[in-house]
Image (spheres, grey):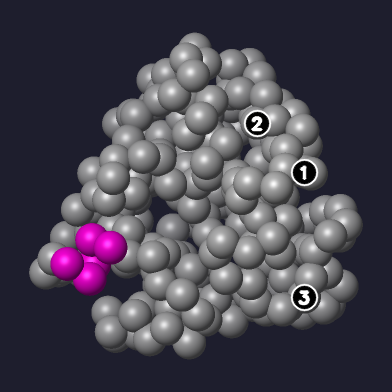
């Protein structure tokens, strides 16, 4: 059974989300797609689509404009990732892969990911080998659900922190602190982060995804991805 794909979107992310959806279609992937809308503009934009299933989330603290990494508004948007994954996991009772909207899919990765089916978490990686929360496969299992609930709880406890944090730093902290869950990182040369793309030659026929992270600004992200999109 192929996993559901989940992403989150506000008005400022619609253009990138459309780009992600187009890449899924062009790759030939047939996964169910859930867009968790974070404002009413996104809900209205996608409500007529037969290809996706819009899912409501809590709009609290969410702004509609595009938000850059390192800001409080970015953190607030990212805090919706794990609750969204948990909702779809429990709704569908099948595996879920969360994909950030600034990712483009060049080739169908379902068979490749299936080779790691013994793991609860299958994660893309950053250039420093930490896990990237922008592309993570969540197996439908009691242990995965327990991990997600732990993550949500820690995020809620940090809401008043004066030190910057986001969902990715909390995710890696849980793993680093010894939470017992089977996890594995995906090869950077196949699931490319922005740093990898900018420092290595990339042949799109031999990769699955490019993530335009490590790039500040919506226009810069689009410019990077457009260098590889035919």
Whole-angstrom CA distance, mark 3 to mark 2, is 25 Å
Identified at 59% across, 16% down, the residue is 143
Mark 2 nearby-residue class (10 Å; few <14, some 14–19, many ≥20): many
Mark 3 or mark 1: which is in front?
1
Q: Which mark is residue 149?
A: none
Q: CA distance from mark 2 to mark 1?
A: 13 Å
Q: CA distance from mark 3 to mark 1?
A: 20 Å
Q: Is residue 54 above or below residue 43?
A: above
Q: Where is 222 relative to 174, above or below?
A: below
Is mark 2 in CB contact (under 8 Å) with mark 1? Answer: no
- What kind of secondary structure does the magenta stretch mostly adopt? helix
Task: Answer with the quarter of the image where residue 115 lies.
Answer: top left
Instruction: Tell me which label, 3 or 2, sits earlier in the chain.
Output: 3
Q: Which residue is mark 2?
A: 151
Among numbered discs 2 and 1, the one appearing first in the sequence: 2
User: What secondary structure is found at the residue carrying circle 1?
Assistant: loop
């Amino acid at each position: 059974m192929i996993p559901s794909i989940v992403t989150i979107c506000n008005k400022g992310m619609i253009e990138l989300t459309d780009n992600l959806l187009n890449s899924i279609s062009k790759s030939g992937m047939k996964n169910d797609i859930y867009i968790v809308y974070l404002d009413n503009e996104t809900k209205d934009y996608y409500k007529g689509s037969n290809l996706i299933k819009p899912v409501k989330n809590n709009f609290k603290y969410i702004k509609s404009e595009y938000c850059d990494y390192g800001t409080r508004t970015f953190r607030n948007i990212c805090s919706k990732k794990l609750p969204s994954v948990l909702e779809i996991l429990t709704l569908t009772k099948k595996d879920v892969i969360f994909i950030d909207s600034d990712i483009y899919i060049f080739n169908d990765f379902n068979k490749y990911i299936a080779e790691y089916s013994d793991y609860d978490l299958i994660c893309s990686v950053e250039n420093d080998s930490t896990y990237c929360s922008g592309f993570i496969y969540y197996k439908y299992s009691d242990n995965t659900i327990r991990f997600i609930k732990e993550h949500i709880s820690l995020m809620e406890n940090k809401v008043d922190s004066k030190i910057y944090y986001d969902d990715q730093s909390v995710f890696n902290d849980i793993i680093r602190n010894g939470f017992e869950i089977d996890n594995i990182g995906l090869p950077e040369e196949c699931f490319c982060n922005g740093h990898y793309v900018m420092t290595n030659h990339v042949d799109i026929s031999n990769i699955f995804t490019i993530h335009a992270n490590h790039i500040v600004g919506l226009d810069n992200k689009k410019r990077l991805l457009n260098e590889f999109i035919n």
